[in-house]
Image (spheres, grey):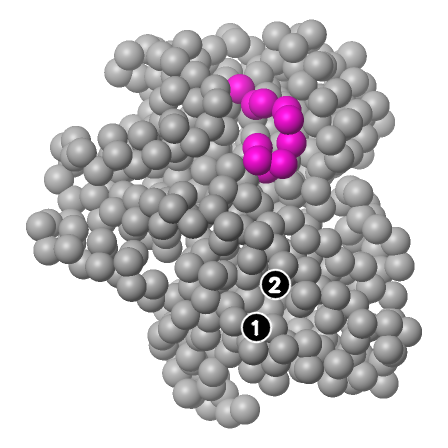
Amino acid sequence: MAYDKSIEAFEAANKVIPGGVDSPVRAFGSVGGTPPFMERGEGGYLFDIDGNRYVDFVQSWGPLIFGHADKDVEKAVIETAKKGLSFGAPTELETQLAGEIVSLFDGIDKVRFVSSGTEAVMSAIRLARGVTGRDNIIKFKGCYHGHSDSLLVQAGSGAVTFGAPSSPGVPADLTKHTLLATYNDIESVTACFRDSEDIACVIIEPIAGNMGLVPAEEEFLVALRTLCDMHGTLLIFDEVMSGFRASLKGAQGITAVKPDIVTFGKVIGGGMPVGAFASNTAIMSHLSPEGPVYQAGTLSGNPVAMAAGLASLKKLKSNPSAYIELAAKAKRLTEGFQAAANAEEIPFVTDVRGSMFGFFFSDKSVKDFDDAQQNNEQAFGIFHREMLSRGIYLACSAYETGFISVATTEAMIDAAITAAYESMRVVADTL
Ligand SMILES: *Cc1c(COP(=O)(O)O)cnc(C)c1O
C-alpha cells in the first residue's frame, strides 16, 4: 500500500496542529508509522486519501454501530441541518431522544445532554458531589473517563492510592480527592472507604474498554453496589463506550446491578458529538435550573446531533436481534485471531461483549490494569502494522477496544482472519 499523500498530509498537519492530530491516539505513537488520513467511509469500509481501502474495526472509536454513512442517520442529519444548525433554544428532538433513553432503562427518569463523553462524566461527578455534599471520589486504575482534571489520575506512590496527576497542568490539589482502586478487586475499594468517609461516588466502566476490553465480574459489581449503599455513596456507571454497544442497554443489559447515575456518549450521537448523563428524578432535580448544581452548554442538545442519535437509537430499538448477530461476528473474528496466534504458538487471549472485542498478547486472562500491562506491546505493534498493510484497520493501541458494526459483513471477517494468519506469522518470525 502507498501512503504518499498521508505522509504529506501528516507533515502539513504537524506544522499547524500539535502532533498533527486533535486526539493523541490518532498519531499512531504506540505502533509507529504514519496515520492514514481518511477521505470517506462506506458501511464497514474506510478509504484513505491515497485510495487505500480498509475494513474498519475502529468505527470512530465506537460511535458508528451502523457503519459509515448509514442511510437513515444520514437522512436525519441532512433533513435537520436544512432547518438550521443550532438555536440555543429548546427543540422537541431533545425530548424525543431523552424519551428513548428513559423508556429503555429502569431507574432513569431524566437525561441531560452535553457534547462529549468527557463533559458527561465531568458533569456527573459534579452532580454526585453536589447531591452528597462530599468531595472525594473513587475511580479504578485503567478506566478512562475523559480528560477532565479530577479524572486524569494515576496511582500515587503511597500504600494508600490517593491519586497523583497523570498530566502536567492538573493540580495535585484536585487529584488528591480522587482515590484509586483496582478493577475487579473489592478489597481495594473497601480500603478506600476505610481511608475516607467523605466519598461522593464510585465511578466505573462496568465493561472496561480503555485498558483493552476487561469486563467487570458480576460478584465484584454486586459487592460494589453494597459498599456504596453502606456508605451513602453514589455509584456511577460510565457507559460512554459500552452504552448501546455491549447490548441495547449496554452493560446494564448484562449485569443485574443498578447504578445511581449513568453517563453516555459515542453511539448515543450516531457519529455526531453527543454525551449525556442520566439518573432518577430525585438526583437530577439537583441540577440547574431546577437545583443548585450548575452545568450548561452553548451547543448542548444540538438539533443535528440529536437527530443523528435519535435515528440510531430508533433503528437499534427496532432491531434488537442485531446484537446477537454483532456478538456472533465478534466471536468469529476473535476465534479466528486466536487460531492464527495458536498456529504460531503466540500467547494470546481474547474477549467479547456484544459488538465490543478485545485481545491481548498475553498468556493469562486479564482482570485488571496490571494484567493488561503484561501485554507484549512489541508483538501488538507488529501485528497492527501487518494487519494495516493488508487493509485491516485495528485500533492503533493495545489498550483500546475493537468494534463490529451492523455493516461489518461475514466476508470482511473472513478477510481479517486471513490477514491475521499472515500477520501472526510475521510476529512469530520477528520476535
Ligand atoms: C470515550 C470515553 C470517554 C470520553 O468521551 P469523549 O467523547 O472522548 O470525551 C469517557 N468514558 C469512557 C468510558 C469512554 O470510552
Badge 2: how crowded within 10 Å, few (<14), some, or many (20+)? Answer: many
Which of 89 and 15 lies nearest the eye of the viewer?
89
In the picture of the structure, the residue carrying the numbered disc 1 is 410
From this view, report whether residue 137 is shown above or below residue 95: above
The quadrant of the image that shows the N terminus is bottom right
Query: Which amino acid type is marked by label 2?
Result: Lys
| Region rendered in magenta | 251-260
Residue shown at 81% from the left, 30% from the top: 185
Query: Hey, which quadrant is residue 327 in on the image?
Result: bottom right
SS majority, magenta: loop
Question: Is residue 254 part of the magenta span, yes or no?
Answer: yes
Q: Residue furthest left?
A: 83
Residue shown at 75% from the left, 35% from the top: 217
The quadrant of the image that shows the C terminus is bottom right
In the picture of the structure, the residue carrying the numbered disc 2 is 329
Question: Is residue 129 part of the magenta span, yes or no?
Answer: no
The numbered mark, 2 or 1, whose residue comes first in the sequence reads 2
Residue shown at 25% from the left, 47% from the top: 307
Cβ–Cβ under 8 Å for marks 2 and 1: yes
Q: Where is residue 323 shown, x and y percent of the image?
A: 54, 51
Q: Where is residue 143 shown, x and y percent of the image?
A: 64, 40
Query: Which amino acid type is marked by label 1?
Result: Glu
Which of 238 and 193 lies nearest the eye of the viewer?
238
**SS assignment at label 2:** helix
* Number of numbered discs: 2
